[in-house]
Amino acid sequence: MAERQPRSATATRARILDAARAQFAADGYDRTTMRSVAGTAGVDAAMVVRYFKTKETLFAEAATFVLDIPDLSGVAPEKFAEVLMPRFFQVWEEDGTFLALMRAAATNAAAAAAMQQVFATQVAPALAAVAVDRHDERAALVGSQILGLVFARYVLKIPPLVGMSHNQLVRWMGPTLRRYLTEPL
């Protein structure tokens, strides 16, 4: 008879969150259910409810991530894109959490609030540190440009953008990021 592994609440919770991240990324917010997450995690649906209570709570925790935006304070403005964009590519291409949040934010208030929280606590302060003035407006404009790019390239999959290499995107985005953050209005 096989020896039974002891149950770990921490491991079970982590397994549920991993399953939720994968499902929200693949299926979006609306098509992901607590029951489907439970099935993917290999637990009873009651276990998901026990740990997270609601789908909104599960999504909020699954959508939590740290961008680790590089410090731009010592970076020349013409190098902003070279420093920022590789980190963004990594988040967009290696972690489905951001794209799930992006897709869901268009139709779900909780997802939109989570996206706003990421922007307010992680993106805006990093960009405001190098903006010459009107920090909030300049950071928001950069955010709109970056979110537009990620939406067009990874969600809508617009062919010219999908076909561009990382280096090409960095070259195209560089002047725009510099202009938004440092040039006079």
Image (cartoon, grey):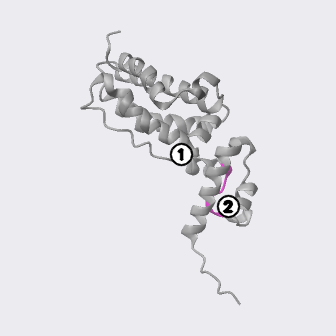
Q: Quadrant of the C terminus?
A: top left
> What residue would you read off at disc 2?
48
Task: Give the Cα separation between the discs numbered 2 and 1.
Answer: 25 Å
Q: Residue at x 59, y 39 (%)?
A: 99
Q: Nearer the viewer, mark 2 or mark 1?
A: 1
In what element is the residue under mark 2?
helix
Quadrant of the image for the N terminus?
A: bottom right
Q: Main secondary structure of the magenta part?
A: helix
Residue visible at 30% across and 30% down?
A: 129
- The residue lying at 37 percent from left, 30 percent from top is 82
> Would you say residue 67 is visible in this rendering?
yes
- Which tag, 2 or 1, sits closer to the chain's start? 2
Q: Which residues are magenta?
A: 50-55
Q: Are marks 2 and 1 in contact (CB under 8 Å)?
A: no
**In the orientation shown, which residue stands out farthest toward the top?**
185
- Residue that carries the numbered disc 1 in the rendered image: 94
- 153 vs 41, nearest the viewer: 153
Q: Where is residue 77 shown, x and y percent of the image? A: 30, 23
| Residue 37, image x, y percentages | 70, 56
> Is there any visible trace of residue 125 in the rendered image?
no
Question: What residue lies at 68% left-to-right and 32% top-to-bottom?
Answer: 107
Query: How many other residues sit within 10 Å of disc 1, few (<14), some (14-19) or many (≥20)?
Result: few
Magenta region includes residue 53: yes
Callout 1: SS: helix
The image shows residue 184 at horizontal and vertical percentages of: 32, 10
In the image as oriented, which residue stretches furthest toward the bottom? 1
Residue type at tag 1? Glu
Work out whether 70 lies above or below 175.
below
Q: Is residue 122 magenta?
A: no
Q: Is residue 43 above or below residue 147?
A: below
Disc 2 marks which amino acid?
Answer: Val
Q: Quadrant of residue 179?
A: top left
